[in-house]
Amino acid sequence: MASQLEYKCPCCGGAIAFDTTLQKLKCPYCDTEFDVDTLKHYDEELKNDRPDEMDWNMSDGAEWKEGETDGMRVYVCRSCGGEIIGDDTLAATSCPYCGNPVVLMGQFAGDLKPDLVIPFKLDKKAAKEGLTNHLKGKRLLPKIFKDQNHIDEIKGLYVPFWLFDATADASIRYKATRVRHWSDSRYNYTETSYYALMRGGSVSFSAVPVDGSSKMEDELMESIEPYDMSQAVDFQTAYLAGYLADKYDVDEDASVGRANERIKRSTEQEFASTCVGYTGVIPENSNIKLFGGRAKYALLPVWILNTTWNGQNYRFAMNGQTGKFVGNLPTDKKALLRWLFSLGLGIAAAVLAVLFLFWKLRG
């Protein structure tokens, strides 16, 4: 069984958790506040805790067959004795029976320990308000979804990310065009000039994030960016108290391709922004070399909200630091048809107005 770490209030013995507003650990029972550094030595002592070894040689009952327990972990809450079952990528959770925050230290041993963490700045109330604001102003959203929508699940989750630093030396060649129009009494003229543009230089990248969890859609995680990396701090398990945490299951090597893709796209966009004064610019050849590449393992705060409507699950995500909220919504098909019909009428009316004006001018 994996070792586990629980934070108890030294004053009253209650379970303490990280408070997003105070940026401290706080006991909800006696309101005592603790700085993270204050509990550092306490943390070290808890890490040395070991479970009792009181084995019974019992053989009654059916045994697990080979492969049935693959990917399954069982944890025991010391507060109420309840068993917590999760998969092998679960890093931290809370007891579903008594709500006591539990940190599973075995998941962070060795090379699995994160380098950095950005603490949650926004709480569960802010996540609920984020969903309410996300639903506002959506004309094609079914009214019943907005009126009867309820959140099936909401959880604060530290998502694993690889943060890539590198310098990109790039040489890019573009084909550019410049179009000029003029006319005389007889003809309309169009002149297209073509240019070969060369751009070269270096761009430095710091903390390019790549989602390290296969459970989270990359597009969803990228949609709630950016994070303020200046607020990242050295990882300590105290920040995880009261929140879920997911261990990476996409390693650094497997994340390099995504990082390269993001760096290449950003480099090309940065260089293309210098090609001004042209009608069109198309890259013809791109050569990018990376130097000084390195990666750090970090946990970034995300609020995940799930709701079900008409048998379909809708997932929303909110940046736990900035509050940026994203998520797909259902569409009222009748409202969409009415909107398309009214749009068609508007276009038809505009066309008729133009034709009428043209007819008046000809007359």
Image (cartoon, rainbow, N blue to C red):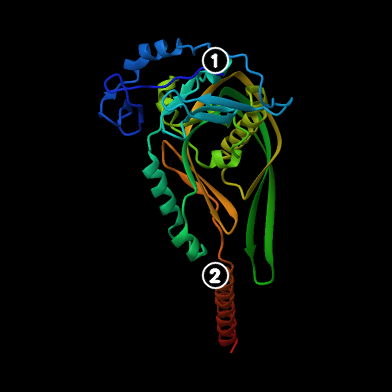
Q: Secondary structure at mark 2?
A: helix
Q: Quadrant of the C terminus?
A: bottom right
Q: Quadrant of the N terminus?
A: top right
**Image: 319 above or below 242:** below
Which is more foreground, mark 2 or mark 1?
1
Which residue is under mark 1? 109
* In the image, farthest residue toward the bottom: 363
Query: In this image, 105 relative to 344: left or right?
Result: left
Q: Can residue 88 be seen by looking at this rendering?
A: no
Query: In this image, 151 relative to 349: left or right?
Result: left
Which residue is under mark 2? 335
Residue 336: x %, y % from top left: 57, 68
Q: Residue at x 61, y 36 (%)?
A: 215
Residue 220: x %, y % from top left: 56, 42
In this rendered view, identify the residue nearer to me: 184 or 65: 65
Query: In this image, 41 relative to 61: left or right?
Result: left
Q: CA distance from mark 2 to mark 1?
A: 54 Å
* In the image, farthest residue toward the right: 66
Residue 147: x %, y % from top left: 44, 62
* Image marks 2 and 1: residues in contact by CB distance under 8 Å: no
Q: Amino acid at mark 2?
A: Ala
